[in-house]
Image (cartoon, rainbow, N blue to C red):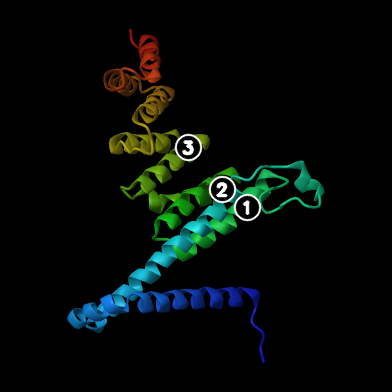
Amino acid sequence: MARLTRQEILKEDRFMLVVDRIRHFFIKHRIQLSWGLAFAGAGGLLAIAFFFYSAQQEEQSKDELAMALTTYHAPISQAAKSKTPGVDVRVTFATSARKYEQALVELREVITRYGTRSAGKIATYFAGLCLHQLDRNPEAIKQLKPLSRETSDFGALALAALARIYEDSLDLAKATDAYEQLVDRDALTTPGETTAMHLALLYERQDKNKEAVEIYEKIIKNFPDSSFSSQAEQRLKKITP
């Protein structure tokens, strides 16, 4: 008789756990379901089963994402280098490269399983950051671009990450384009005054003083109580006659 691998056993156990929970759900709510079926027929039963299973998947996706982010935020420790007994090496790494490589593996597993869910989109964002930290910028851009096209907050996060990658790569034209999109979106995930200030400074670096002046004036007008307002005034004095 063939022996199941640990991964196969875990998959089987997870599936059986979901089946068991669905069974208990139906037993507990059998009266309500009976009335529902009287009106909706078998389709109603399938819809309820799907809803319950989807809720279970949502919770599972959050748990797996949390584990991957624990790795992403893990500290670098000398204890991991010396392999000190008793140290939890899962959340402690000898080098940042090892940490981001392991986090990338875990995040991609979340993306594969839950790519269309919120957890999958957050994992996509952090996977792009991992690739950037590992100096694999072409892969990071490829990872983030599809998500950056969304008009959601997830898309704004991905677009902000792309802007930083382009800037770090000295591709100022693409960085500027990304920041322009962020300013237009005015997403809550990317504070307006911070993004606008960065965009204006990028314009200056490319000798586009006219565009920079317009942005600085908007910062002063729209964010008068922000610390960026005084910075914008100082920049205006330097670049205007």
Which residue: 82% across, 47% down?
A: 82
Q: Position of residue 119 (x, y in %)?
A: 44, 56
What residue did someone put label 1 on? 101
Q: Secondary structure at mark 1?
A: helix
Above or below, 63 against 70 in this view is: below
What residue did someone put label 2 on? 130
Q: Are marks 1 and 2 in contact (CB under 8 Å)?
A: yes
Q: Earlier in the sequence, mark 2 or mark 3?
A: 2
Whether residue 136 is visible to the viewer of this picture, yes or no, is no
- Left or right placement of residue 19 versus residue 87 in this view: left
Which of 172 and 67 lies nearest the eye of the viewer?
Answer: 67
- Left or right placement of residue 27 versus residue 170 in this view: left
Above or below, 150 against 201 in this view is: below
- Left or right placement of residue 44 versus residue 15 in this view: left
Which of 149 and 176 lies nearest the eye of the viewer?
Answer: 149
Q: Earlier in the sequence, mark 3 or mark 1?
A: 1
Q: Residues within 10 Å of mark 2 (few under 14, many from 20)?
A: many
Query: Residues under labels 2 and 3: Cα distance?
Result: 13 Å
What amino acid is at disc 1?
Glu
Q: Residue furthest top?
A: 241
- Residue 164 got which mark? 3
What amino acid is at disc 3?
Arg
Above or below, 238 against 33 in this view is: above
Asked where in the image residue 179 lies, by quadrant, the reply is: top left
Q: Are marks 2 and 3 in contact (CB under 8 Å)?
A: no
Q: Earlier in the sequence, mark 1 or mark 2?
A: 1
Above or below, 51 against 145 in this view is: below
Query: Residues under labels 1 and 2: Cα distance?
Result: 7 Å
- Residue 25 got which mark? none
